[in-house]
Protein backbone atom coordinates (compact mmCIF):
# COMPACT_ATOMS: atom_id res chain seq x y z
CA UNK A 1 0.00 0.00 0.00
CA UNK A 2 1.48 3.35 -1.04
CA UNK A 3 2.25 5.71 1.84
CA UNK A 4 1.07 9.28 1.89
CA UNK A 5 2.66 11.79 4.22
CA UNK A 6 1.33 15.06 5.54
CA UNK A 7 3.94 17.29 7.09
CA UNK A 8 1.85 20.06 8.52
CA UNK A 9 2.36 23.26 10.38
CA UNK A 10 5.02 23.95 7.79
CA UNK A 11 2.40 24.51 5.10
CA UNK A 12 -0.71 26.55 5.69
CA UNK A 13 -3.07 27.90 3.09
CA UNK A 14 -3.41 31.42 4.40
CA UNK A 15 -4.75 33.48 1.56
CA UNK A 16 -8.47 33.66 0.80
CA UNK A 17 -7.92 32.56 -2.78
CA UNK A 18 -6.61 29.15 -1.73
CA UNK A 19 -8.86 26.20 -1.17
CA UNK A 20 -8.11 24.85 2.27
CA UNK A 21 -5.58 24.20 5.01
CA UNK A 22 -3.25 21.40 6.11
CA UNK A 23 -2.60 21.33 9.84
CA UNK A 24 -0.65 18.82 11.95
CA UNK A 25 2.39 18.55 14.17
CA UNK A 26 4.13 15.43 12.87
CA UNK A 27 4.61 13.27 9.83
CA UNK A 28 1.68 10.88 9.69
CA UNK A 29 1.16 7.74 7.62
CA UNK A 30 -2.46 7.79 6.49
CA UNK A 31 -2.39 5.44 3.48
CA UNK A 32 -4.41 5.84 0.32
CA UNK A 33 -7.72 4.60 1.63
CA UNK A 34 -7.88 6.55 4.89
CA UNK A 35 -11.34 8.13 5.10
CA UNK A 36 -11.60 8.06 1.32
CA UNK A 37 -14.77 7.47 -0.70
CA UNK A 38 -13.88 4.63 -3.05
CA UNK A 39 -16.47 5.93 -5.49
CA UNK A 40 -15.38 9.57 -5.28
CA UNK A 41 -13.71 11.51 -8.09
CA UNK A 42 -10.32 12.90 -6.98
CA UNK A 43 -8.97 14.24 -10.26
CA UNK A 44 -10.53 16.51 -12.86
CA UNK A 45 -10.12 16.50 -16.60
CA UNK A 46 -9.06 19.77 -18.15
CA UNK A 47 -12.31 20.09 -20.04
CA UNK A 48 -14.10 19.83 -16.69
CA UNK A 49 -11.87 22.55 -15.24
CA UNK A 50 -12.79 24.82 -18.15
CA UNK A 51 -16.50 24.08 -17.85
CA UNK A 52 -16.33 24.58 -14.10
CA UNK A 53 -14.65 27.99 -14.39
CA UNK A 54 -17.22 29.24 -16.90
CA UNK A 55 -20.17 27.86 -14.96
CA UNK A 56 -18.93 29.12 -11.61
CA UNK A 57 -18.34 32.62 -12.97
CA UNK A 58 -21.77 32.70 -14.59
CA UNK A 59 -23.44 31.71 -11.36
CA UNK A 60 -21.30 32.97 -8.45
CA UNK A 61 -24.06 32.19 -5.97
CA UNK A 62 -24.02 30.38 -2.65
CA UNK A 63 -22.11 31.78 0.32
CA UNK A 64 -21.71 35.57 0.27
CA UNK A 65 -24.14 35.82 -2.65
CA UNK A 66 -24.86 39.47 -1.90
CA UNK A 67 -21.19 40.31 -2.43
CA UNK A 68 -20.87 38.31 -5.63
CA UNK A 69 -24.18 39.29 -7.21
CA UNK A 70 -26.45 41.78 -5.49
CA UNK A 71 -24.18 44.53 -4.15
CA UNK A 72 -23.15 45.94 -7.55
CA UNK A 73 -26.76 45.69 -8.75
CA UNK A 74 -27.89 47.73 -5.76
CA UNK A 75 -25.03 50.22 -6.20
CA UNK A 76 -26.27 50.66 -9.80
CA UNK A 77 -29.78 51.33 -8.39
CA UNK A 78 -31.58 48.73 -10.48
CA UNK A 79 -33.32 47.41 -7.37
CA UNK A 80 -34.31 48.68 -3.95
CA UNK A 81 -34.24 46.68 -0.73
CA UNK A 82 -37.37 46.44 1.39
CA UNK A 83 -36.42 45.35 4.91
CA UNK A 84 -32.78 44.29 4.97
CA UNK A 85 -31.18 47.46 3.64
CA UNK A 86 -27.50 47.13 4.56
CA UNK A 87 -26.27 46.99 0.98
CA UNK A 88 -28.35 49.85 -0.44
CA UNK A 89 -27.46 52.10 2.48
CA UNK A 90 -23.78 51.36 1.85
CA UNK A 91 -22.84 49.39 4.93
CA UNK A 92 -19.06 49.11 4.64
CA UNK A 93 -18.72 45.34 5.01
CA UNK A 94 -15.79 43.23 3.75
CA UNK A 95 -16.03 41.79 0.26
CA UNK A 96 -15.20 38.31 -0.99
CA UNK A 97 -13.13 37.14 -3.94
CA UNK A 98 -12.35 33.53 -3.02
CA UNK A 99 -14.64 32.10 -5.69
CA UNK A 100 -13.00 34.18 -8.41
CA UNK A 101 -9.59 32.79 -7.54
CA UNK A 102 -10.15 29.31 -6.12
CA UNK A 103 -13.02 28.16 -8.33
CA UNK A 104 -12.26 30.00 -11.53
CA UNK A 105 -8.79 31.48 -12.04
CA UNK A 106 -7.07 28.48 -10.46
CA UNK A 107 -8.92 26.18 -12.86
CA UNK A 108 -7.75 28.22 -15.83
CA UNK A 109 -4.20 28.44 -14.49
CA UNK A 110 -4.09 24.64 -14.26
CA UNK A 111 -5.16 24.36 -17.90
CA UNK A 112 -2.61 26.92 -19.09
CA UNK A 113 0.17 25.22 -17.12
CA UNK A 114 -0.65 21.70 -18.29
CA UNK A 115 -0.94 22.61 -21.95
CA UNK A 116 2.16 24.82 -21.93
CA UNK A 117 4.61 22.01 -21.12
CA UNK A 118 4.59 19.00 -23.44
CA UNK A 119 0.92 18.04 -23.07
CA UNK A 120 0.22 14.32 -23.36
CA UNK A 121 -1.74 12.88 -26.28
CA UNK A 122 -4.48 12.02 -23.81
CA UNK A 123 -5.19 15.60 -22.74
CA UNK A 124 -4.78 16.87 -26.30
CA UNK A 125 -7.95 14.92 -27.09
CA UNK A 126 -9.77 17.51 -24.93
CA UNK A 127 -8.50 20.34 -27.10
CA UNK A 128 -5.33 21.50 -28.81
CA UNK A 129 -2.77 23.33 -26.70
CA UNK A 130 -3.22 26.65 -28.47
CA UNK A 131 -7.01 26.52 -28.15
CA UNK A 132 -7.17 25.38 -24.54
CA UNK A 133 -4.63 28.03 -23.53
CA UNK A 134 -6.19 30.71 -25.72
CA UNK A 135 -9.72 30.30 -24.38
CA UNK A 136 -8.40 30.07 -20.80
CA UNK A 137 -6.44 33.31 -21.17
CA UNK A 138 -9.44 35.16 -22.57
CA UNK A 139 -11.75 33.98 -19.82
CA UNK A 140 -9.15 34.58 -17.10
CA UNK A 141 -8.88 38.18 -18.31
CA UNK A 142 -12.66 38.58 -18.08
CA UNK A 143 -12.66 37.33 -14.50
CA UNK A 144 -9.69 39.45 -13.48
CA UNK A 145 -11.29 42.60 -14.87
CA UNK A 146 -14.24 42.03 -12.57
CA UNK A 147 -11.95 41.53 -9.57
CA UNK A 148 -9.80 44.61 -10.10
CA UNK A 149 -12.73 46.86 -11.02
CA UNK A 150 -14.41 45.95 -7.75
CA UNK A 151 -11.40 46.07 -5.40
CA UNK A 152 -8.44 47.88 -6.99
CA UNK A 153 -4.94 46.38 -6.73
CA UNK A 154 -5.18 42.59 -6.53
CA UNK A 155 -3.10 39.42 -6.88
CA UNK A 156 -2.55 38.47 -10.51
CA UNK A 157 1.06 37.90 -11.57
CA UNK A 158 1.72 35.57 -8.65
CA UNK A 159 -1.82 34.25 -8.59
CA UNK A 160 -1.36 33.03 -12.16
CA UNK A 161 1.78 31.06 -11.38
CA UNK A 162 1.04 29.96 -7.83
CA UNK A 163 2.93 26.93 -6.57
CA UNK A 164 2.51 24.83 -3.47
CA UNK A 165 4.98 27.13 -1.70
CA UNK A 166 3.26 30.41 -2.59
CA UNK A 167 0.32 31.19 -0.34
CA UNK A 168 0.63 34.94 0.15
CA UNK A 169 0.53 36.49 -3.34
CA UNK A 170 1.56 40.08 -3.83
CA UNK A 171 -0.97 42.66 -5.00
CA UNK A 172 -0.25 43.97 -8.48
CA UNK A 173 -0.94 47.62 -9.16
CA UNK A 174 -4.22 48.08 -11.00
CA UNK A 175 -2.47 49.58 -14.01
CA UNK A 176 -0.29 46.47 -14.26
CA UNK A 177 -3.35 44.25 -13.86
CA UNK A 178 -5.10 46.05 -16.71
CA UNK A 179 -2.02 45.80 -18.91
CA UNK A 180 -1.91 42.05 -18.19
CA UNK A 181 -5.64 41.72 -18.93
CA UNK A 182 -5.21 43.43 -22.29
CA UNK A 183 -2.15 41.30 -23.07
CA UNK A 184 -4.02 38.09 -22.16
CA UNK A 185 -6.97 39.03 -24.35
CA UNK A 186 -4.74 39.67 -27.34
CA UNK A 187 -2.48 36.69 -26.76
CA UNK A 188 -5.40 34.34 -26.18
CA UNK A 189 -7.22 35.61 -29.25
CA UNK A 190 -4.17 35.23 -31.49
CA UNK A 191 -3.46 31.69 -30.28
CA UNK A 192 -6.85 30.34 -31.31
CA UNK A 193 -6.62 28.04 -34.32
CA UNK A 194 -9.80 26.94 -36.07
CA UNK A 195 -7.96 24.09 -37.81
CA UNK A 196 -6.95 22.47 -34.50
CA UNK A 197 -9.04 20.53 -31.98
CA UNK A 198 -11.57 22.81 -30.30
CA UNK A 199 -11.76 22.91 -26.49
CA UNK A 200 -14.31 20.29 -25.44
CA UNK A 201 -15.06 21.92 -22.10
CA UNK A 202 -16.27 25.14 -23.70
CA UNK A 203 -19.82 25.71 -22.41
CA UNK A 204 -19.92 29.31 -23.61
CA UNK A 205 -19.42 29.03 -27.38
CA UNK A 206 -19.15 25.23 -27.65
CA UNK A 207 -15.94 25.25 -29.61
CA UNK A 208 -16.73 28.13 -31.99
CA UNK A 209 -13.34 29.82 -31.94
CA UNK A 210 -14.34 32.63 -34.29
CA UNK A 211 -16.87 33.74 -31.70
CA UNK A 212 -14.24 33.55 -28.95
CA UNK A 213 -12.06 35.89 -31.02
CA UNK A 214 -14.94 38.36 -31.40
CA UNK A 215 -15.56 38.16 -27.66
CA UNK A 216 -11.90 38.92 -26.91
CA UNK A 217 -11.99 41.98 -29.17
CA UNK A 218 -15.27 43.17 -27.67
CA UNK A 219 -13.89 42.85 -24.13
CA UNK A 220 -10.84 44.81 -25.31
CA UNK A 221 -13.15 47.66 -26.36
CA UNK A 222 -14.76 47.61 -22.93
CA UNK A 223 -11.48 47.34 -21.01
CA UNK A 224 -9.69 50.11 -22.88
CA UNK A 225 -12.62 52.49 -22.43
CA UNK A 226 -12.45 51.76 -18.69
CA UNK A 227 -8.99 53.37 -18.79
CA UNK A 228 -10.21 56.53 -20.54
CA UNK A 229 -9.88 58.72 -17.45
CA UNK A 230 -6.20 57.80 -17.22
CA UNK A 231 -5.51 57.77 -20.95
CA UNK A 232 -7.97 60.19 -22.58
CA UNK A 233 -5.83 61.15 -25.57
CA UNK A 234 -6.91 60.06 -29.03
CA UNK A 235 -3.36 58.78 -29.57
CA UNK A 236 -2.80 57.39 -26.07
CA UNK A 237 -2.52 53.83 -24.82
CA UNK A 238 -6.25 53.23 -24.34
CA UNK A 239 -7.33 54.68 -27.69
CA UNK A 240 -4.56 52.86 -29.54
CA UNK A 241 -5.53 49.49 -28.06
CA UNK A 242 -9.21 50.21 -28.70
CA UNK A 243 -8.61 50.94 -32.36
CA UNK A 244 -6.39 47.90 -32.75
CA UNK A 245 -9.12 45.62 -31.36
CA UNK A 246 -11.81 47.25 -33.48
CA UNK A 247 -9.77 46.83 -36.66
CA UNK A 248 -8.59 43.30 -35.87
CA UNK A 249 -9.43 40.90 -38.68
CA UNK A 250 -11.38 38.62 -36.31
CA UNK A 251 -13.99 41.34 -35.80
CA UNK A 252 -16.12 42.25 -32.79
CA UNK A 253 -19.57 41.14 -31.69
CA UNK A 254 -22.05 42.76 -34.09
CA UNK A 255 -24.77 40.12 -34.40
CA UNK A 256 -27.04 38.48 -31.84
CA UNK A 257 -25.68 35.11 -32.92
CA UNK A 258 -22.18 36.12 -31.79
CA UNK A 259 -23.21 37.24 -28.30
CA UNK A 260 -21.90 35.48 -25.20
CA UNK A 261 -24.68 34.04 -23.02
CA UNK A 262 -24.21 31.59 -20.16
CA UNK A 263 -25.94 28.25 -20.58
CA UNK A 264 -28.18 28.40 -17.52
CA UNK A 265 -29.49 24.89 -16.80
CA UNK A 266 -31.18 24.15 -13.46
CA UNK A 267 -31.40 20.42 -14.30
CA UNK A 268 -27.59 20.38 -14.49
CA UNK A 269 -27.14 22.20 -11.16
CA UNK A 270 -26.60 25.48 -12.97
CA UNK A 271 -29.50 27.77 -12.01
CA UNK A 272 -29.71 31.51 -12.49
CA UNK A 273 -28.13 32.94 -9.28
CA UNK A 274 -30.82 35.59 -8.86
CA UNK A 275 -33.33 32.85 -8.13
CA UNK A 276 -31.55 32.50 -4.76
CA UNK A 277 -32.76 35.92 -3.64
CA UNK A 278 -36.17 36.19 -1.98
CA UNK A 279 -38.39 38.34 -4.20
CA UNK A 280 -40.16 39.83 -1.17
CA UNK A 281 -36.91 41.50 -0.11
CA UNK A 282 -36.50 43.53 -3.30
CA UNK A 283 -38.38 45.85 -5.65
CA UNK A 284 -37.42 47.41 -8.96
CA UNK A 285 -36.18 50.91 -8.18
CA UNK A 286 -38.32 53.93 -8.81
CA UNK A 287 -35.28 55.66 -10.29
CA UNK A 288 -35.03 53.05 -13.04
CA UNK A 289 -38.78 52.93 -13.63
CA UNK A 290 -39.20 56.69 -14.00
CA UNK A 291 -36.12 56.93 -16.21
CA UNK A 292 -37.62 54.31 -18.53
CA UNK A 293 -40.93 56.14 -18.56
CA UNK A 294 -39.14 59.34 -19.49
CA UNK A 295 -40.88 61.09 -16.60
CA UNK A 296 -40.39 64.73 -15.72
CA UNK A 297 -40.23 64.07 -11.98
CA UNK A 298 -37.23 64.00 -9.65
CA UNK A 299 -36.79 60.24 -9.92
CA UNK A 300 -35.77 60.30 -13.59
CA UNK A 301 -31.97 60.14 -13.45
CA UNK A 302 -31.51 60.50 -17.19
CA UNK A 303 -32.07 62.99 -20.01
CA UNK A 304 -34.68 60.66 -21.54
CA UNK A 305 -38.23 61.94 -22.07
CA UNK A 306 -39.45 59.16 -24.36
CA UNK A 307 -41.33 56.04 -23.21
CA UNK A 308 -38.92 53.09 -23.28
CA UNK A 309 -40.84 49.82 -23.61
CA UNK A 310 -37.97 47.86 -22.10
CA UNK A 311 -39.82 48.66 -18.88
CA UNK A 312 -42.50 46.13 -19.87
CA UNK A 313 -39.81 43.44 -19.73
CA UNK A 314 -37.88 44.69 -16.72
CA UNK A 315 -40.76 45.15 -14.26
CA UNK A 316 -43.06 42.41 -12.99
CA UNK A 317 -46.17 44.39 -13.93
CA UNK A 318 -45.38 43.76 -17.60
CA UNK A 319 -46.72 47.22 -18.45
CA UNK A 320 -45.59 50.83 -18.66
CA UNK A 321 -47.62 51.55 -15.51
CA UNK A 322 -45.11 49.80 -13.23
CA UNK A 323 -44.42 51.47 -9.89
CA UNK A 324 -40.90 51.39 -8.47
CA UNK A 325 -39.71 51.72 -4.88
CA UNK A 326 -37.58 54.80 -4.10
CA UNK A 327 -33.98 53.72 -3.67
CA UNK A 328 -31.76 53.90 -0.62
CA UNK A 329 -34.09 54.23 2.34
CA UNK A 330 -34.17 52.16 5.50
CA UNK A 331 -37.71 51.24 6.49
CA UNK A 332 -38.01 54.04 9.06
CA UNK A 333 -36.82 56.76 6.69
CA UNK A 334 -38.98 55.40 3.88
CA UNK A 335 -42.13 55.85 5.92
CA UNK A 336 -40.99 59.26 7.18
CA UNK A 337 -40.51 60.40 3.58
CA UNK A 338 -44.09 59.41 2.80
CA UNK A 339 -43.32 56.36 0.63
CA UNK A 340 -44.58 52.81 0.91
CA UNK A 341 -43.77 49.42 -0.58
CA UNK A 342 -47.48 48.90 -1.29
CA UNK A 343 -48.25 48.40 -4.97
CA UNK A 344 -44.60 48.43 -6.06
CA UNK A 345 -43.23 46.03 -8.67
CA UNK A 346 -40.45 43.50 -8.40
CA UNK A 347 -37.96 42.77 -11.14
CA UNK A 348 -39.67 40.60 -13.73
CA UNK A 349 -39.37 36.85 -13.30
CA UNK A 350 -37.93 36.87 -16.82
CA UNK A 351 -34.63 37.88 -15.20
CA UNK A 352 -34.74 36.03 -11.89
CA UNK A 353 -36.27 32.60 -12.42
CA UNK A 354 -33.92 29.66 -12.00
CA UNK A 355 -33.84 29.24 -15.78
CA UNK A 356 -33.52 32.90 -16.81
CA UNK A 357 -30.77 33.74 -19.28
CA UNK A 358 -27.71 35.80 -18.31
CA UNK A 359 -25.41 37.49 -20.79
CA UNK A 360 -21.70 38.11 -20.65
CA UNK A 361 -21.29 40.37 -23.70
CA UNK A 362 -23.86 41.56 -26.21
CA UNK A 363 -23.80 43.20 -29.62
CA UNK A 364 -25.79 46.17 -28.33
CA UNK A 365 -23.27 46.94 -25.57
CA UNK A 366 -20.39 46.58 -28.03
CA UNK A 367 -22.02 49.17 -30.32
CA UNK A 368 -22.57 51.50 -27.36
CA UNK A 369 -18.86 51.23 -26.56
CA UNK A 370 -18.11 52.10 -30.18
CA UNK A 371 -20.47 55.08 -29.88
CA UNK A 372 -18.58 56.34 -26.84
CA UNK A 373 -15.20 55.91 -28.51
CA UNK A 374 -16.46 57.83 -31.53
CA UNK A 375 -17.72 60.62 -29.27
CA UNK A 376 -14.23 60.87 -27.74
CA UNK A 377 -12.64 61.15 -31.17
CA UNK A 378 -10.89 57.79 -30.81
CA UNK A 379 -12.42 56.57 -34.08
CA UNK A 380 -14.02 58.06 -37.17
CA UNK A 381 -17.25 56.11 -36.71
CA UNK A 382 -20.51 58.07 -36.59
CA UNK A 383 -21.86 58.48 -33.05
CA UNK A 384 -25.52 58.54 -34.10
CA UNK A 385 -25.15 55.36 -36.15
CA UNK A 386 -23.37 53.47 -33.38
CA UNK A 387 -25.86 54.65 -30.72
CA UNK A 388 -28.87 53.75 -32.85
CA UNK A 389 -27.51 50.30 -33.61
CA UNK A 390 -26.63 49.73 -29.96
CA UNK A 391 -30.17 50.51 -28.79
CA UNK A 392 -31.88 48.48 -31.52
CA UNK A 393 -29.70 45.43 -30.90
CA UNK A 394 -30.38 45.64 -27.18
CA UNK A 395 -34.12 45.59 -27.83
CA UNK A 396 -33.63 42.66 -30.21
CA UNK A 397 -31.62 40.54 -27.82
CA UNK A 398 -34.06 41.17 -24.98
CA UNK A 399 -36.88 39.89 -27.17
CA UNK A 400 -34.79 36.91 -28.21
CA UNK A 401 -34.04 35.77 -24.65
CA UNK A 402 -36.96 36.98 -22.56
CA UNK A 403 -40.06 36.94 -24.79
CA UNK A 404 -40.20 33.26 -25.65
CA UNK A 405 -43.87 33.02 -26.63
CA UNK A 406 -46.58 35.40 -27.78
CA UNK A 407 -49.27 34.31 -25.36
CA UNK A 408 -50.48 36.93 -22.90
CA UNK A 409 -47.88 37.81 -20.31
CA UNK A 410 -48.57 36.69 -16.74
CA UNK A 411 -46.16 37.35 -13.90
CA UNK A 412 -47.11 34.01 -12.38
CA UNK A 413 -48.18 31.58 -15.11
CA UNK A 414 -46.47 32.90 -18.26
CA UNK A 415 -43.59 35.26 -17.38
CA UNK A 416 -41.77 34.60 -20.66
CA UNK A 417 -44.76 35.56 -22.78
CA UNK A 418 -45.99 38.93 -23.96
CA UNK A 419 -45.42 41.37 -26.78
CA UNK A 420 -42.11 41.86 -28.53
CA UNK A 421 -40.60 45.31 -27.98
CA UNK A 422 -38.32 45.39 -31.05
CA UNK A 423 -40.89 47.22 -33.24
CA UNK A 424 -40.47 50.21 -30.91
CA UNK A 425 -36.68 50.28 -31.02
CA UNK A 426 -36.01 52.59 -33.95
CA UNK A 427 -38.40 55.32 -32.80
CA UNK A 428 -36.89 55.28 -29.30
CA UNK A 429 -33.33 55.28 -30.67
CA UNK A 430 -34.14 58.22 -32.95
CA UNK A 431 -35.45 60.19 -29.97
CA UNK A 432 -32.32 59.46 -27.98
CA UNK A 433 -30.04 60.52 -30.81
CA UNK A 434 -31.99 63.80 -30.87
CA UNK A 435 -31.33 64.21 -27.14
CA UNK A 436 -27.61 64.53 -27.88
CA UNK A 437 -28.17 68.09 -29.07
CA UNK A 438 -29.17 69.23 -25.58
CA UNK A 439 -27.69 66.62 -23.23
CA UNK A 440 -24.44 65.78 -25.02
CA UNK A 441 -23.29 62.49 -26.51
CA UNK A 442 -21.38 61.34 -23.44
CA UNK A 443 -24.40 61.65 -21.18
CA UNK A 444 -26.87 59.98 -23.55
CA UNK A 445 -24.52 57.08 -24.28
CA UNK A 446 -23.76 56.59 -20.57
CA UNK A 447 -27.46 56.54 -19.75
CA UNK A 448 -28.18 54.05 -22.51
CA UNK A 449 -25.44 51.80 -21.22
CA UNK A 450 -27.13 51.83 -17.81
CA UNK A 451 -30.42 50.73 -19.35
CA UNK A 452 -28.82 48.12 -21.62
CA UNK A 453 -26.76 46.61 -18.79
CA UNK A 454 -29.82 45.97 -16.61
CA UNK A 455 -28.91 43.38 -13.94
CA UNK A 456 -25.28 43.27 -15.14
CA UNK A 457 -24.23 44.90 -11.91
CA UNK A 458 -20.44 44.82 -12.16
CA UNK A 459 -20.28 46.27 -15.67
CA UNK A 460 -22.91 48.91 -14.98
CA UNK A 461 -21.32 49.98 -11.68
CA UNK A 462 -17.90 50.26 -13.35
CA UNK A 463 -19.40 52.37 -16.15
CA UNK A 464 -21.14 54.69 -13.68
CA UNK A 465 -18.01 55.23 -11.62
CA UNK A 466 -16.02 56.08 -14.71
CA UNK A 467 -18.51 58.26 -16.58
CA UNK A 468 -20.77 59.66 -13.85
CA UNK A 469 -23.85 58.64 -15.87
CA UNK A 470 -26.67 58.32 -15.14
CA UNK A 471 -26.89 61.06 -12.53
CA UNK A 472 -27.53 58.72 -9.61
CA UNK A 473 -27.89 60.25 -6.16
CA UNK A 474 -26.58 58.66 -2.94
CA UNK A 475 -28.97 56.69 -0.78
CA UNK A 476 -30.93 59.02 1.55
CA UNK A 477 -30.25 56.63 4.44
CA UNK A 478 -26.56 56.13 3.60
CA UNK A 479 -24.38 55.14 6.54
CA UNK A 480 -21.03 55.90 4.87
CA UNK A 481 -21.28 59.69 4.72
CA UNK A 482 -23.48 59.76 1.63
CA UNK A 483 -21.16 58.44 -1.10
CA UNK A 484 -22.23 55.90 -3.71
CA UNK A 485 -19.60 53.16 -3.19
CA UNK A 486 -16.55 53.47 -5.40
CA UNK A 487 -15.26 49.97 -4.61
CA UNK A 488 -15.69 46.96 -2.33
CA UNK A 489 -13.56 46.45 0.76
CA UNK A 490 -10.89 43.78 0.58
CA UNK A 491 -11.90 40.35 1.98
CA UNK A 492 -11.38 39.90 5.71
CA UNK A 493 -9.16 36.86 5.06
CA UNK A 494 -6.69 39.12 3.28
CA UNK A 495 -6.59 41.49 6.25
CA UNK A 496 -5.92 38.60 8.62
CA UNK A 497 -3.62 36.34 6.63
CA UNK A 498 -2.02 38.34 3.80
CA UNK A 499 -1.69 41.57 5.70
CA UNK A 500 1.57 42.94 4.36
CA UNK A 501 0.40 42.63 0.75
CA UNK A 502 -3.07 43.85 1.69
CA UNK A 503 -1.59 47.03 3.18
CA UNK A 504 0.32 47.70 -0.05
CA UNK A 505 -2.96 47.39 -1.94
CA UNK A 506 -4.59 49.94 0.34
CA UNK A 507 -1.74 52.37 -0.37
CA UNK A 508 -2.94 52.69 -3.99
CA UNK A 509 -6.43 53.87 -3.02
CA UNK A 510 -7.58 57.47 -2.77
CA UNK A 511 -7.78 58.12 0.11
CA UNK A 512 -5.49 55.36 1.37
CA UNK A 513 -8.20 53.62 3.38
CA UNK A 514 -9.86 50.26 2.85
CA UNK A 515 -13.35 51.72 2.62
CA UNK A 516 -16.10 51.64 0.02
CA UNK A 517 -15.69 55.40 -0.46
CA UNK A 518 -12.05 55.17 -1.61
CA UNK A 519 -11.30 55.26 -5.33
CA UNK A 520 -9.36 52.68 -7.33
CA UNK A 521 -6.60 53.82 -9.68
CA UNK A 522 -8.64 54.20 -12.87
CA UNK A 523 -11.24 56.22 -10.94
CA UNK A 524 -8.76 58.74 -9.51
Image: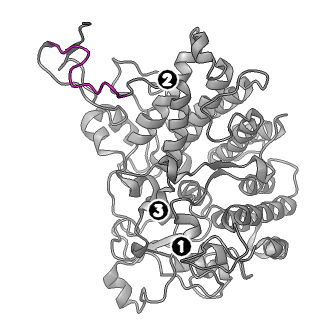
Residue at the disc numbered 3 = 275
Seen at 61% across and 57% down, the residue is: 357
Range shown magenta: 28-40
Q: Indicate whether residue 33 is drawn in magenta.
A: yes
Vertical comparison of 460 with 285: above or below: above
Looking at the picture, tell me which residue is in the foreground, 10 or 108.
108
Where does the image place residue 25, in percent across and percent down from the top left?
11, 18
Where does the image place residue 298, in percent across and percent down from the top left?
57, 85
Residue at the disc numbered 2 = 110
Badge 3 crowding class, 10 Å Cα cut-off, few under 14, some 14 to 19, many 20 or more, is: some
Seen at 55% across and 32% down, the residue is: 50
Label 3 and label 1: CA atoms lie apart by 11 Å
Q: Indicate whether residue 180 is drawn in magenta.
A: no
Q: Is residue 520 left or right of residue 82?
A: right
Badge 2 crowding class, 10 Å Cα cut-off, few under 14, some 14 to 19, many 20 or more, is: some
Kind of element beneath mark 2: helix
Pointer 2 with pointer 3, Cβ within 8 A = no
Residue 204 sits in quarter: top right
Seen at 74% across and 26% down, the residue is: 190
Looking at the picture, tell me which residue is in the foreground, 76 or 470.
76
Label 1 and label 2: CA atoms lie apart by 39 Å
Residue 139 visible in the snapshot: yes
Label located before the other in sequence (3 or 1):
3
Give the residue at the far left of this rendering.
25
Badge 1 crowding class, 10 Å Cα cut-off, few under 14, some 14 to 19, many 20 or more, is: many
Amino acid sequence: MKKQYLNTLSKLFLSSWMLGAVVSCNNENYSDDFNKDQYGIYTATYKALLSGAIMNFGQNAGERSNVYQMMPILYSQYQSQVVYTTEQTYGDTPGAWGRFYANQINNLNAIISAYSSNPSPEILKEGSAENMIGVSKIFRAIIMKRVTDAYGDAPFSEATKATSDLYLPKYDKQQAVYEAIIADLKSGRDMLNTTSTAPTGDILYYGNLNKWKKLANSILLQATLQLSKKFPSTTGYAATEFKAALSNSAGVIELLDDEAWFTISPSNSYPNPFSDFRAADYRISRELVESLKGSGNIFNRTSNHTADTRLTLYASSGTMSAVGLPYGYNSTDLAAAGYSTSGTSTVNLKFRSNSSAINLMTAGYTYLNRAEAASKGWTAEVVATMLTQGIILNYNTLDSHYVLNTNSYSAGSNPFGGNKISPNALAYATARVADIATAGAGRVIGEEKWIALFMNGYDSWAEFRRTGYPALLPAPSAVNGGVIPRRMRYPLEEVNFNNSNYLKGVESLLPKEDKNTSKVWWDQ
